[in-house]
Image (cartoon, rainbow, N blue to C red):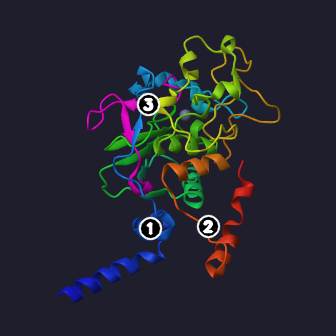
Amino acid sequence: MAFGYLLLNLILITGYYGLPVEDDPSVIVNDETENSIDDGDVIDLTGLEPNAFGYPKDESGEAVANWTESSLMNPEEMGGYAEGDILIPQYTRNGVRDQASLWPKGIIPYDIDRRFNQEQRDTIMRAIADYHRLTCLRFVPYKGQADYIAIKSANTGCWSSVGRLGGRQEVNLQAPGCLSKKGTVLHELLHAVGFMHEQSRPERDNFVKIHYNNIKTGAENNFKKADPKRSNDYGISYDYNSVMHYSEHAFSKNSQKTIEPKVSGVTLGQREGLSRGDVKKINNMYNCKKEEPQTGWVGSIWQSLFGDKSKDLP
Ligand SMILES: [Zn+2]
């Protein structure tokens, strides 16, 4: 009896090995994903504006619908939510509004709305593949898990909640605006992972100048700094290249810059991919012990597939 049970388990476990990592919920047994997250790791949301807690709005959708590749700002910088694209539902499952959690073991179940077309789905999957290639996070297809993200495309802009709220939580990517760049998908997913905006770091005034005269009336809240007591830099210094940094014209009323870097030669608001700093911050937040295989046959296959990928990062 016991032997039969063991055998069945062995068959079940080994049966998973042929699946790609994106589809394989058993990937947690792999050494590469040896995260040591406690269920209790909390993300403090009390620094958010009251409008971070609410409901999706159609007005934000109109702005994103009018967005084009030549727009000065990113589509997620056009919403009427807290900091443009942060929305926490008024009531979460456990009733706690002002705190979220990390995802245990860095595993994030996701469900993608069937209304996305193939090209849009591909953009989402390319973003997820980046997380799998560069971090310990594992996005696994939703199969009835208690907590998961529902990626959908209502006409309400690009937005996400911050961290794991408990139960079903939405990441909205209005098509096609929010799917024009893989980086916008990476950005919204990184909110769901647990990160805020780079330019809201408490020490940002040492790195960028905010031009309040150019900010749209009513959008000043998007340039608030986080309380140092409630934020954690995870050992990574201010990162102009972060996919979580706003662009220089975010919430501008007059096509003049609202955020100006204090050094030359940097571009703000890139949405091409995760920066080196983003990758390190994620892996530090999730206690990722992942080491890229460098030597041996695993290493040579790994390197030929992914190379020294850090050189390609922004
Ligand atoms: Zn954002």
- Residue plotted at (45% across, 40% down): 171
Which element type, helix, strand or loop, lies under badge 3? Answer: loop
Magenta-drawn segment: 80-108
Which element type, helix, strand or loop, lies under badge 1? Answer: helix
Residue 157: percent from left, percent from top: 51, 31
- Look at discs 2 and 1 and give the one toward the viewer: 2
Residue 33: percent from left, percent from top: 48, 64
Which element type, helix, strand or loop, lies under badge 2? Answer: loop
The residue to which callout 2 is attached is: 292
Identify the amino acid type marked 1: Val
**Label whose residue precedes the other's in the sequence (2 or 1):** 1
Question: Hey, which residue is sitting farthest left in the picture?
Answer: 1
Residue 267: percent from left, percent from top: 75, 35
Q: How many marks?
A: 3
Disc 2, disc 1: CB below 8 Å?
no
Kindly report the distance in space between the C-alpha atoms of the residues bearing marks 3 and 1: 30 Å
Residue 88 lies within the magenta run? yes
The residue to which callout 3 is attached is: 87
Q: Is residue 73 above or below residue 309?
A: above
Kindly report the distance in space between the C-alpha atoms of the residues bearing marks 2 and 1: 16 Å
Q: In the rendered image, which quarter is residue 13 located in?
A: bottom left
Callout 3 environment at 10 Å: few (<14), some (14 to 19), or many (20+)? Answer: many
The residue to which callout 1 is attached is: 27
